């Protein structure tokens, strides 16, 4: 069967669709945007639209779905939120005047990384678009922008892991590239749900050359060129608000890989994926959207430069001393709108009268802010005060030109203030007087004709007319009016006088609207010429907002200024986990000290589950992040070195998408720390080795401790349930044991949540199981099994002729033994003997040996607690 011939409209649609195969095409038809073919089928499902058909009587009807043009933005937002692109096709000429097919073009391609609209909930979030270019050595140039604010930055990343860390920090939803990305990177991007778009690098033009002139590294400039080419190709309009691209080095900031960032819950709660319950949630007392975004950026990029950090401390301290100035600053900042995004809308050509009034009202706060800063110590705040532009010229322009209550639309009139333009005032006078004249004419004609129902009306076809009902026609002088239209129940008439006045009024209305829009765009253009000034002011006010927020939180939660030192000495007195303390309340939280002298490398932490080991470790990391952000910290005293990196391995999680088990993830994160940490790094290892057989896990944990102690030498907190590892303090001089206190009172476990010197005396595992609510019968059975096992350990210990004094020899001792004959093994003193369940003599009977062999071969990590207890019971019966 021959394929049905395309109609001119569908031919036009298909030609445009071929240029945007990866986007939904919103094709304008009158008052609707229509979707066709596959777009209609999928769009109807995603947007819950009714799926209809075009040419439904043909052999191959075309699927079709549509949305009203006035509501299209809501539907576009839904698709973009789901990770799709939307190409908006508009009619480029008046259908009534067009010859043949109406000309249509794509006026904008909306993508996850280029959307300008933000909801109120996302006002304090950036929407970053990232571009990548490849280097010959296998590295990457990386550039990013937030189109709504105009920020453009670029850097160089040496490996795939670094790319993933940066895009994780930026929380990007779209990446654009001119190259084929490595398979492993593509797999990770796909698993993270990040849209990857392609954009060929285009020949440099004046605009891109200007924006990238400060970039000197080839791969960074290439990435920025690709980024800008994509923006210009998709947005198809002026982007004068884009700032000059600046280069940054990742090594300038405290390095936190994406796992550590997630584990510490700096900006996203691991459980809810929301802001609540994070460090950002605690510290955010900002009054402006741009201040909220700046605080998030500070937290995501803690500093390494001591001078800048100390300057932030100084400013916070000054605001803490002067409560009234801080309160005044907060009050004025409440009236400052989002200057960064207002500037973006002005450049984008979407700012309306209400946006300009928000800009004006924000600028009106600047003089008061300058007065407040002038009352503070000039040695501390003088630099910020000098950076503030009062903007009296722009504030005056908007106040003079824009009406106080303008409509949303800039084309409907009413946006320009009376008195701003004489000609516009004349047009308005004609319209006002003309309508008054019409009202007076209607009253006059009613009086003279005696027809009280006579009225003067208007429609677009006939203009102004006089309407008389047919019941009153007899009362009308036949020569008084000229008949224009006959209706069922009335007649419509005109007069020469009425037509003259109509022409005057309609001409004034048309010219008034055109002139008013012209005047508004001129005002907007003048503001657009000052966008760089507005962006500089926005950055200064955002910094002020962050500083007052940190000062307020420091006062509310009794934070203190840390002392930064060049020594590798770490002292925290009465340290707290700031988020947990906020949730529990200051009175309920138990503060703890952290002390690690210069030569001390590892703090080995033991104690039962739920006692607070992980919280203790996290609070140290958060204290470091806060200190290097420039914030005061949750402690009564703090002396800290400046760390270059933080690595964490906290919590149990798998990565099923990549096919990695919990243990594999654990080992991978441990490897990242071991391979990349330096003496200036901080490492947090929580319960390494749990995901495999007991002795495998114990051996790995000890080897990692020894490696960090002897080679890496980073400050390390290592919590463990392997109590045998505490004996390493005898062999590793820079390792110190501490434990989280717990006592057993009347069979109940009581946590002190206090970190004490020395190893824990036991793990209290059964007590914790009881707290979890396991049945009493099960708990009692577990206690019996434990008692039997401990009794067997004593028996086995007594029969063993020789036993190692430690779980395993430290690495240094082991290496020495390779070169020398193995010394005679001497039995250890009973007090030093470690648990060794399998160290049995040759006289054990075959049945017992078979049970021991089965125990060795069993992987308890794959068993449930109940299965393990039943298996223990079975083995016990076999050995009786």
Image (cartoon, rainbow, N blue to C red):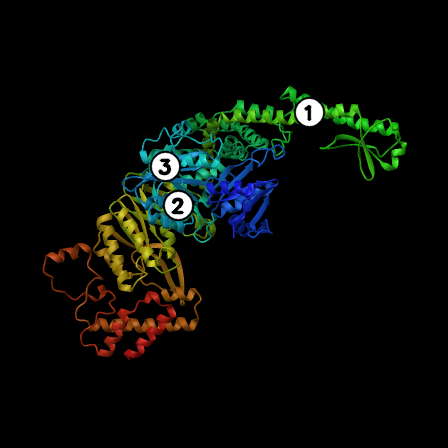
Relative to residue 797, is residue 472 drawn left or right? right
Residue 448 visible? The answer is yes
Circle 1 — which element? helix
Relative to residue 99, is residue 781 drawn left or right? left
Query: Residue 77 appears at what percent x and percent y?
Result: 53, 44
Cα separation, mark 2 vs mark 3, equals 18 Å
Circle 3 — which element? helix
Residue count near mark 3 (Cα–Cα under 10 Å), binned few <14, some 14–19, many ≥20: many
Residue count near mark 1 (Cα–Cα under 10 Å), binned few <14, some 14–19, many ≥20: some
Depth order, front residue of 179/487 = 487
Query: Along the polypeptide, which appears first: circle 2 or circle 3?
Result: 2
Query: Along the polypeptide, which appears first: circle 1 or circle 2?
Result: 2
Query: Along the polypeptide, which appears first: circle 3 or circle 1?
Result: 3
Cα separation, mark 1 vs mark 2, equals 58 Å
Q: Marks 1 and 2: which is nearer the front? A: 1
Circle 2 — which element? helix
Query: Residue 658 appears at what percent x and percent y?
Result: 36, 55
The reply to whether the C-beta atoms of the residues labelled 3 and 1 are less than 8 Å apart is no
| Mark 2, residue position | 168
The reply to whether the C-beta atoms of the residues labelled 2 and 3 are less than 8 Å apart is no
| Mark 3, residue position | 223
Location of the C terminus by quadrant is bottom left
């Amino acid at each position: 069967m021959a394929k049905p011939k395309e109609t001119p409209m569908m031919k036009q649609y298909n030609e445009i669709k071929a240029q945007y195969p990866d986007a939904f095409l919103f094709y304008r038809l009158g008052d609707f945007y229509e979707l066709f073919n596959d777009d209609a089928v999928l769009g109807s499902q995603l947007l819950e639209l009714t799926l209809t058909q075009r040419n439904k009587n043909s052999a191959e009807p075309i699927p079709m779905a549509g949305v009203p043009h006035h509501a299209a933005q809501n539907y576009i937002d839904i698709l973009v939120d789901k990770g799709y692109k939307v190409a908006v096709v508009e009619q480029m000429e008046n259908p009534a005047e067009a010859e043949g097919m109406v000309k249509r073009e794509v006026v904008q391609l909306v993508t996850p990384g280029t959307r300008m609209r933000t909801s109120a909930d996302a006002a304090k979030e950036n929407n970053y678009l990232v571009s990548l270019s490849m280097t010959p050595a296998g590295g990457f140039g990386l550039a990013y922008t937030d189109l709504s604010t105009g920020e453009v930055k670029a850097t160089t990343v040496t490996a795939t892991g670094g790319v993933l860390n940066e895009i994780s920090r930026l929380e990007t939803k779209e990446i654009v590239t001119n190259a084929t990305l490595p398979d492993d990177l593509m797999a990770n991007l796909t698993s993270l749900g990040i849209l990857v778009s392609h954009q060929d690098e285009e020949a440099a033009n004046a605009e891109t050359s200007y924006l990238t002139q400060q970039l000197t590294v080839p791969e960074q400039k290439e990435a920025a060129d690709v980024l800008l080419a994509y923006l210009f190709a998709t947005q198809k309009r002026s982007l004068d608000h884009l700032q000059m691209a600046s280069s940054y080095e990742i090594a300038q900031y405290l390095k936190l890989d994406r796992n550590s960032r997630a584990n510490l819950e700096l900006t996203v709660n691991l459980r809810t994926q929301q802001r609540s319950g994070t460090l950002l949630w605690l510290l955010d007392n900002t009054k402006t959207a741009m201040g909220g975004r700046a605080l998030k950026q500070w937290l995501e990029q803690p500093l390494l430069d001591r001078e800048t950090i100390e300057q932030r401390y100084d400013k916070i301290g000054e605001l803490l001393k002067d409560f009234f100035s801080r309160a005044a600053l907060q009050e004025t900042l409440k009236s400052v709108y989002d200057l960064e995004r207002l500037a973006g809308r002005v450049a984008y050509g979407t700012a309306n009268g209400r946006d300009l009034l928000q800009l004006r009202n924000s600028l009106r706060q600047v003089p008061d802010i300058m007065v407040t800063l002038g009352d503070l110590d000039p040695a501390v705040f003088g630099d910020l005060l000098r950076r503030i532009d009062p903007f009296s010229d722009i504030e005056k322009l908007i106040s003079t030109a824009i009406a106080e209550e303008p409509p949303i639309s800039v084309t409907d009139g009413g946006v320009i203030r009376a008195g701003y333009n004489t000609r516009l005032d004349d047009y308005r006078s004609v319209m006002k007087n003309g309508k008054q004249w019409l009202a007076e004419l209607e009253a006059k004609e009613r009086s003279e004709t005696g027809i009280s129902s006579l009225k003067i009306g208007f429609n677009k076809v006939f203009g102004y007319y006089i309407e008389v009902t047919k019941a009153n026609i007899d009362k009308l002088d036949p020569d008084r009016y000229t008949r224009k239209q006959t209706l069922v129940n009335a007649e419509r008439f005109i007069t020469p006088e009425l037509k003259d006045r109509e022409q005057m009024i309609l001409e004034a209305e048309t010219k008034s609207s055109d002139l008013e829009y012209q005047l508004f765009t001129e005002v907007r253009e003048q503001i657009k010429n000052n966008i760089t000034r507005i962006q500089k002011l926005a950055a200064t006010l955002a910094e002020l907002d962050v500083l007052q927020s940190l000062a307020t939180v420091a006062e509310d939660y009794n934070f203190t200024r840390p002392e930064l030192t060049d020594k590798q000495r770490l002292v925290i007195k009465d340290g707290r986990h700031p988020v947990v303390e906020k949730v529990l309340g200051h009175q309920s939280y138990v503060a703890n000290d952290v002390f690690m002298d210069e030569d001390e490398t590892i703090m080995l932490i033991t104690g039962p589950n739920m006692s607070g080991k992980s919280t203790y470790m996290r609070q140290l990391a958060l204290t470091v992040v806060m200190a290097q952000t420039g914030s005061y910290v949750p402690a009564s005293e703090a002396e800290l070195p400046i760390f270059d990196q933080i690595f964490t391995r906290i919590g149990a999680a798998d990565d099923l998408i990549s096919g990695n088990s919990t243990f594999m993830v654990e080992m991978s994160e441990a490897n990242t720390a071991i391979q990349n940490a330096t003496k200036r790094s901080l490492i947090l290892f929580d319960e390494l080795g749990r995901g495999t057989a007991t002795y495998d896990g114990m051996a790995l944990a000890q080897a990692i401790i020894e490696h960090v102690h002897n080679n890496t030498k980073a400050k390390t907190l290592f919590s463990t349930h392997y109590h045998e590892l505490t004996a390493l303090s005898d062999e590793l001089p820079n390792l110190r044991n501490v434990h989280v206190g717990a006592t057993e009172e009347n069979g109940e476990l009581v946590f002190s949540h206090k970190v004490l010197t020395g190893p824990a005396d036991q793990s209290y595992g059964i007590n914790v199981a009881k707290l979890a609510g396991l049945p009493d019968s099960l708990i009692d059975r577990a206690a019996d099994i434990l008692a039997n096992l401990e009794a067997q350990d004593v028996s086995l210990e007594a029969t063993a002729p020789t036993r190692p004094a430690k779980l395993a020899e430290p690495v240094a001792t082991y290496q020495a033994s390779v070169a020398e004959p193995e010394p005679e093994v001497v039995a250890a003193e009973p007090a030093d003997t470690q648990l060794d369940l399998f160290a049995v003599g040759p006289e054990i009977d075959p049945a017992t040996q078979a049970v021991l062999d089965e125990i060795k071969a069993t992987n308890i990590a794959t068993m449930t607690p109940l299965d393990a207890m039943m298996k223990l019971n079975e083995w016990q019966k076999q050995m009786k």
